[in-house]
Image (tube, grey):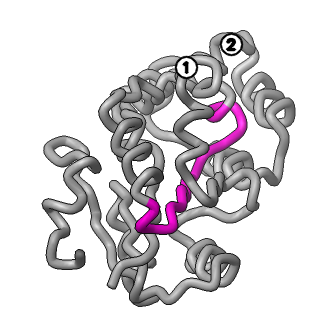
Amino acid sequence: MIKTLIFDFGDVFINLDKQGAMSNALRLFKMTEFEYDMVETNIKYEIGEISTSEFLGFYKTKFPYLSEHNIVHAWNYIIKDFPNHRLEFAKQLKKSNKYKLILLSNTNEMHIDFIKENVSFYNAFKKCFDKFYLSHEINLRKPNTNIYEFVLTQNNLNPEECIFVDDTKENTDTAHKLGIHTWNIDETKEDVVNLFKIQKHLF
């Protein structure tokens, strides 16, 4: 029996434009792909190993022709709309009191600050969850095994009683190896609000 629902944030609740953001950034940086030091810096920022000022400093040094505004805009370009019906779904889950609700997201400080400023109901959404784990706050990131072990241990969870919903297959694959039920949601044609319909065999 499923007792805990663990959700990713981006492309599960809030819509993202990953491809568009990548294309926009590469065009801005006048590159065809991200270089190793950029990938490493992005990961360090995502797990809170470096501050926002250090992150911006890296990019301003690497691309001196860009303003801080250019860099911040490119970084937040990925974040799009948050459909209201998904907020209502989260509220209904909270109200039902049937499940422990956990959010587990690879999210950095600038992105969450942007969301707080632009999603009027962010606090109402956050209050729906018993635990709200962001990678830069817990210094762990998906798909590494230790982030799932952290969530299981911190909440004294039996993996067989959990389902994890994420749009990235690499993330759900790792969770699945630990015995957690998973739904690798296809955000182009599936919606998290249909969880109980699509994954009805688990409920």
For the N terminus, the quadrant is: bottom left
The residue closer to the viewer here, 41 or 93, is 93
Q: Which mark is residue 21?
A: none
For disc 1, the marked residue is 120
User: Residue 80: x, y in percent?
Assistant: 41, 24
Q: Amino acid at mark 2?
A: Leu
Instruction: Answer few, some or many: residues within 10 Å of disc 1's Cα (few below 14, many 20 plus, some between 14 and 19).
Output: few
User: Residue 184: x, y in percent?
Assistant: 28, 63
- Tell me if I can see residue 42 in this picture: yes
- Residue farthest toward the front in the current orientation of the protein: 96
Q: Secondary structure at mark 2?
A: loop
Give the residue displayed 50% in from the left and 61% down from the top: 101
For disc 2, the marked residue is 66
Q: Secondary structure at mark 1?
A: loop
- Judge whether residue 7 is colored magenta: no
Give the extent of the magenta segment.
97-112
Is 200 placed above or below 96 here? below
Give the residue displayed 63% in from the left and 85% down from the top: 156
The residue closer to the viewer here, 191 or 27, is 191
Is 160 placed above or below 20 here? below
